[in-house]
Amino acid sequence: MSADVTQALTRGEWAGVLANRAQLDAIREQFLDTPFDGHAVAALLLFEQPFGFNAQDVEDETQVAAYCDAMAKEQSSQGNEPASQIFRELGERHRGRAAKIAALLPPAGADPLAAGESDGG
């Protein structure tokens, strides 16, 4: 199942922003006028957005990493070290991606509304 996700910025918008890094820094500074650092602001802006991440994304990346590990062992046992090395590297990249995504998500049990608690309002 594939979700339709549009580009966040057009090619022209990206080109304009990337051509003027000082403006990009100014935009970032405006967003960082909070008690949170950039990593935290990114997590908050992505939370519950259709273009954001969720626990399933972490699980998917973790499963792909495990598959790559299994394929690396299989290829190595067959004497195909070049393919084995590719699968080892892919597995590491997927594990790293899972960790980056997980770092943008609230920890399990942190959302009182998801647990059925009242928001006090």
Image (tube, rainbow, N blue to C red):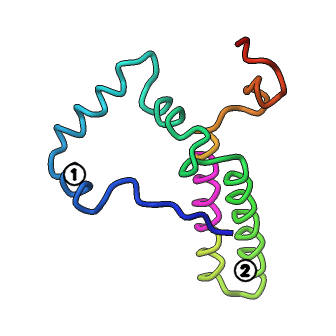
Q: Is residue 121 visible?
A: yes
Q: Is residue 113 left or right of residue 84?
A: right
- Which residue does the image show at 46% across and 30% down from the upper left? 41
Q: Quadrant of the C terminus?
A: top right
Q: Secondary structure at mark 2?
A: helix
* Residue at far front of view: 121
Q: Secondary structure at mark 1?
A: helix
The answer to whether residue 93 is magenta is yes
- Which residue does the image show at 42% across and 31% down from the upper left? 38
- Asked if residue 6 is positioned above or below residue 1 in the image, the reply reads above
The amino acid marked with disc number 2 is: Ser
Q: Mark on residue 18?
A: 1
Query: Which stretch did the figure color magenta?
Result: 89-100
Query: Which one is in front, 77 or 47?
Result: 47
Between the residue at mark 2 and the residue at mark 1, the CA separation in whole angstroms equals 43 Å
Q: Quadrant of residue 10?
A: bottom left
The amino acid marked with disc number 1 is: Leu
Q: Position of residue 14 (x, y in %)?
A: 26, 55
